[in-house]
Amino acid sequence: MKLVLTVVQNQDVGLVLEKLLAKGLRATKLASTGGFLRQGNTTLLVGVQDERVPEVIEILRAVCGPRTGAAVATTGPPLSREGERSVASPADLSPGSPGAAPPRPGGTIAFVLDVVRFDRV
């Protein structure tokens, strides 16, 4: 048995859950935030038999693919003293803006973990 732990953007989570349920797969949904783009996301825990992991990954790939368009990230000045936090300000990362290549919003991260024991209580 495997546990697929995946972080999905909030705009994708409804469709991911719908497609998982259509395949008879269950998921536990945990609200979370963070990441480079500081957007809301949801962590899904999906327990599946080993042979069904590719189904879960394919659903994630189909629904959560990278999107095109402008993105805004936060940047800040370097820390002036050890342990001091900086105040973040928005940075335009849209195509054509100076600086690094823009990140591609969308996508997901999936961790596939071995489950030593599973009990449904």
Image (cartoon, rainbow, N blue to C red):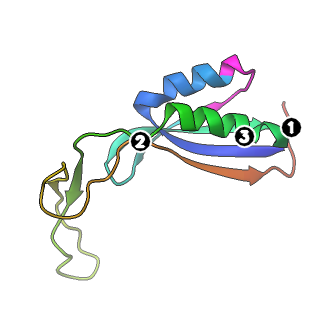
Q: Is residue 34 left or right of residue 76?
A: right
If you read the primary sequence from the N terminus, does the residue marked by circle 1 or circle 3 appear first? 3
Mark on residue 24? Answer: none
**Residue 60 location (% of width, % of height):** 57, 36
Q: Disc 3 on helix, strand or loop?
A: helix
Identify which residue is drawn at 32% across, 48% down: 38
**Residue 35 location (% of width, % of height):** 39, 52
Q: Say which amino acid is labelled 1.
A: Asp
If you read the primary sequence from the N terminus, does the residue marked by circle 2 or circle 1 appear first? 2
* Residue 55 vertical position relative to residue 38 in the rendered view, above or below: above
Q: How many marks?
A: 3
Identify which residue is drawn at 71% across, 34% down: 55
Residue most extreme to the front: 96
Visible residue check, residue 45: no
Q: Disc 1 on helix, strand or loop?
A: loop
Q: Which residues are magenta?
A: 21-29
Task: Classify residue 119 by image quadrant.
Answer: top right
Pointer 3 and pointer 2: residues touching (CB < 8 Å)?
Answer: no
Q: Disc 2 on helix, strand or loop?
A: loop
Residue on which disc 1 sits: 119
* Residue 75 vertical position relative to residue 82 in the rendered view, above or below: above
Residue on which disc 3 sits: 54
Q: Say which amino acid is labelled 2.
A: Pro
Identify which residue is drawn at 68% across, 44% down: 4
How far, Cα to Cα, is label 2 from label 1? 36 Å
How far, Cα to Cα, is label 3 from label 2? 19 Å
Residue on which disc 2 sits: 66
* Residue 64 vertical position relative to residue 74 in the rendered view, above or below: above
If you read the primary sequence from the N terminus, does the residue marked by circle 3 or circle 2 appear first? 3
Task: Classify residue 82 by image quadrant.
Answer: bottom left
Q: Quadrant of the N terminus?
A: top right
